Amino acid sequence: MMIRMLGAALTLLSGMIFAVNVTKEHREKEDCFEELLMLLEHFVWELQTNQPPLAICCQIASQCGKGQMGKLFSTLAQYLAQGGEASPSICMERVFHTHPIPTSVRERLTQLADTLGRYDLAAQISGLQAVQELCRRDLQALTLERSKTVKSCQALGICTGAALAILL
């Protein structure tokens, strides 16, 4: 009887841990994209109105974010301000080593870094707006996926309950 209870507890615990991890990762991606979109809005506005150097633009944008993306942009600003021959793409790769972020967000940031400082102002703004649109699409897909994730977690709960009923 004790082994059955232990098995039931472990089954229940593993199901709960899985569901919590899945929803946590999903929410983290959504939060990153939401914050990135907000920072990109500030970035575009700053480039259009004041045209500051890239490092200063990143620093200003970072002050608008309170989460992972704000910290990431702050670190990027530091790397860009150090000067040297490092391009925004190289600086962004350095930032990735210190800031673990979801792969889908990393892809968008890589696209962003590829457009920064490489072209004239109009092309940079166009590139930023293209990345914004991709981020909006990714966020919309995540929002749609959220309902599927919730249903999967509910199904997991039902299956776990059924497994417990069988074990007990």
Image: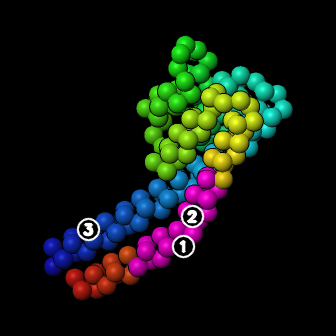
Residue 154 among those drawn in magenta: yes
Name above or below for residue 156 compared with residue 39: below
Q: How is the image coloured?
A: rainbow
Task: Residue under label 2, please give it.
Answer: 141
Q: Is residue 6 above or below residue 36?
A: below
Camera-near label (2 vs 3) is 2
Corner quadrant of residue 8: bottom left
Q: Residue 40: tell me if it is visible.
A: no
Q: Residue 54: where, in percent of width, then height?
A: 67, 25
Q: Which residue is mark 1?
A: 147
Q: Amino acid at mark 2?
A: Ala
Give the camera-side residue of 37 and 131: 131
Earlier-in-chain disc, 2 versus 1: 2
Relative image position of residue 34 (x, y in whole percent): 64, 51
| Region in magenta | 134-155
Crowding at dot 3, Cα within 10 Å, few <14 / some 14-19 / many 20+, comes out as few
